[in-house]
Image (cartoon, coloured by chain):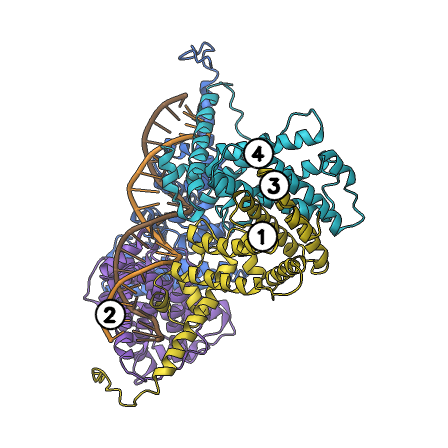
Chain colours: A yellow, B cyan, C blue, D purple, E orange, F brown
Amino acid sequence: MPTKPTKPTKPPARPPVLPRKAQADATRRRLIAAALEAFATRSFDTVAVHEIADAAAVAHGLVFHYFGSKRGLYLEALRDVARQLADVHAVPAADAPAVRIRALLKRHMGFMRRHRKIALHLFRGGLGTDPEAWQIIDEARQRATAWIAVELGLDPGHRALRLMLRALAGAIDEATVHWLAHSRSAGLDSLIDALIEMVAAALRGAARLDPTLDVGGALRALGMD
Amino acid sequence: MPTKPTKPTKPPARPPVLPRKAQADATRRRLIAAALEAFATRSFDTVAVHEIADAAAVAHGLVFHYFGSKRGLYLEALRDVARQLADVHAVPAADAPAVRIRALLKRHMGFMRRHRKIALHLFRGGLGTDPEAWQIIDEARQRATAWIAVELGLDPGHRALRLMLRALAGAIDEATVHWLAHSRSAGLDSLIDALIEMVAAALRGAARLDPTLDVGGALRALGMD
Amino acid sequence: MPTKPTKPTKPPARPPVLPRKAQADATRRRLIAAALEAFATRSFDTVAVHEIADAAAVAHGLVFHYFGSKRGLYLEALRDVARQLADVHAVPAADAPAVRIRALLKRHMGFMRRHRKIALHLFRGGLGTDPEAWQIIDEARQRATAWIAVELGLDPGHRALRLMLRALAGAIDEATVHWLAHSRSAGLDSLIDALIEMVAAALRGAARLDPTLDVGGALRALGMD
Amino acid sequence: MPTKPTKPTKPPARPPVLPRKAQADATRRRLIAAALEAFATRSFDTVAVHEIADAAAVAHGLVFHYFGSKRGLYLEALRDVARQLADVHAVPAADAPAVRIRALLKRHMGFMRRHRKIALHLFRGGLGTDPEAWQIIDEARQRATAWIAVELGLDPGHRALRLMLRALAGAIDEATVHWLAHSRSAGLDSLIDALIEMVAAALRGAARLDPTLDVGGALRALGMD
DNA sequence: TATGAATGAGGATTCATTCAT
DNA sequence: TATGAATGAATCCTCATTCAT
């Protein structure tokens, strides 16, 4: 009969406390990393909790301990990606708007190239139909396009502009997928030039939708008038 | 389907074969319709075969009889959508290119408005990560953007142009989703004006990617030079 | 609307009658042949009616038309094998018993070599646990071993002898499987010599089980005393 | 089973691991026992996983947890039988070869009588056509007949002998089935006498197949010269 | 006689989640 | 905190059988 002394009377004051928390954090991170790895390749429903836990070298029960459910882990992993994206989109304040916007696009494309699988997950159906998942990513995207508008002196809340900024995001995403699939890492600069055309067109399109919207200054700032 | 060689030459050449075949075709169609209905709302993995069969008022075994598998039915349903899209994109030959391209966009948006749920399925994760599913839809999309290029006298096989046409498709899709979500059925004409700006930008972007590409004539035909 | 004249008023007297019956018989035979082919490779439960019908180039509904059920077809196919076995075991009446018994064994092994797959089906689990299937094959086997006993002047109904004849059958079957698996078509004659040893041992064993049984004459007839 | 590398070194070296593992082992054993019970009566395809699980009073999911598949459980159950057989065939080292061989046969038949249903499963089609299942049982059988050969001073790897040992196994199996079916538990000793005749005949048969093989000593040791 | 559409019971398998240890 | 045994709902798919034509 195994001796189980009902509460092992933890005498060694605190030493295990800190390590425990650290250990716990490490486990959380491992799970999120493993989840990203798994979900980057397959959709939510086709990934089993077991696989993620195995990849993280952790008991699968911990997924529920830390994240409540499989979906909880998934959304947390997406939030992690959104956070990374926000970092990438944080262009150092300096230079003229046009320069900064180009910098944003360049950093963005660079991130996508470094995380090709995650990119394809986001833009090729990986999000599935889960509205909450889309919201997390849409927010990141919207923040970036709104930032562009602000840089150009426009109100990102403007209805017509919102529509066109979203179209712009679609254009950038699809261009990204094509670029990744036909991997020509070279030519990134001219690709950015091409995307800047799309940015300009989004502004012009907004003006078409709402003729009262003045995008002249913005186009000029962009060097596209 | 197993090939039945040297069938015993059924001598009494009877037509009653027709009603049976007709009935079978009707069943097939009902299943496809029910599948579209179901998949338009939820993703592949969250729809159960028996739901589709129930909705079609048919034994679920028939899904396998006619389509081999749940996925077989799904892909067939997508092919059906692709066929519908092709019909919609078949603009009557007449008028100037600019007029016809506007017509295409108008018909396209009209279709999406009439089939809002299918549209959201296609553009908001419904396709999941199934490459074959994407291919079916991508083909339809590509055919449409290639048609635009041809209308404008450009070679749709050109590398740079291909990339930008794809970006254009992304822009149109995302604009569609936004338009459907914020349902302002009015203003379709100005939305098309805005999208024409994106078309023009796609051409200009292609020229940025490949300076040897001359898009001057195309822009002029589009009335955007 | 297809014209279906409710009973086509068959005026052409009889000509179709014979062909019909002939056609029906041909269909039956094709189904049995296809069934044997299929069941020779796999067990009852793993063969689908569809496969058999497809192989026979016939609508699968006919299986039920002619044989009532899948199992009906299976048993009929087995009866067909039993009939073939009976033919093979019908040694021309002539010569001494020992010669005829050797002839039986030779014909038996020859049949098994020609129908290797059927043999393996019968002796390696193909019959499954269906008692009726076993009975059909056991009968054929028993008939053969009883014939040997009669040839040797013994009563095949004798209890002890029955047991040993069955053991003999087991020995022959297993030897057959080994022989087929290690295909040395040569040496058939000495293999039969070896099996004759088993026949003799079966007789001697029967005498051990029932000391009142006199097998002396039989052994002498066999040339094994 | 996925390998879990670098497990986080579980520091509190607790023994409560044992009770859990013991419980798990008990569950495994219950499933195997229930499986043997079920498969002894019916063939692989006609037994449903949930029947076994129900009989073991356990969730059916555990079959897959522990054995991967229904077939995995089946093969494991067979391996269990093979192990039991090996135990039964382990005759205490003592006495003369003839005595020990008789002891083997007696123990063998005794086991079969005690596990009549399993015996009938093994020898009457229960194994189906699964080659892996046959291999497991064939190995046990072969080990036993090879042991007999070794006891008699013969090389069990000899080609001709191998064939005849297999025939011998077939004879014993079929005799077993007959004996069980016509249940005369009495007379076991004379049945063994009868089977010894078959053993001797197998040796003589081997010599017929390969005249260079000297079985004189073996027959003498068997008391059958 | 022949066809194959239609049915639906039945079964193996997966997997998120719970929970005792 | 960590483990993994246990549960059982859910699902896809197979397939014998029926039957209208």
* Residue located beneath label 1 in the image: A149
SS for callout 4: helix
Tell me where residue A15 appears, x and y as whole percent.
35, 87
SS for callout 3: helix
SS for callout 2: helix
Per the model, the C-alpha gap separating discs 4 and 2 is 82 Å
CB of mark 4 within 8 Å of CB of mark 3? no
Q: Amino acid at mark 1?
A: Ala
Observer able to see residue A113: yes
Tell me where residue C221 appears, x and y as whole percent.
38, 58
Which label number is shown at residue D110?
2
* Residue located beneath label 4 in the image: B108
Per the model, the C-alpha gap separating discs 1 and 3 is 13 Å
Q: Is residue C73 above or below residue A17?
A: above
Q: Nearer the viewer, mark 4 or mark 2?
A: 4
Tell me where residue B46 appears, x and y as whole percent.
40, 48
SS for callout 1: helix
Per the model, the C-alpha gap separating discs 1 and 4 is 28 Å
Residue density around tag 2, few if under 14, some if 14–19, many if 20 or more, within 10 Å: some
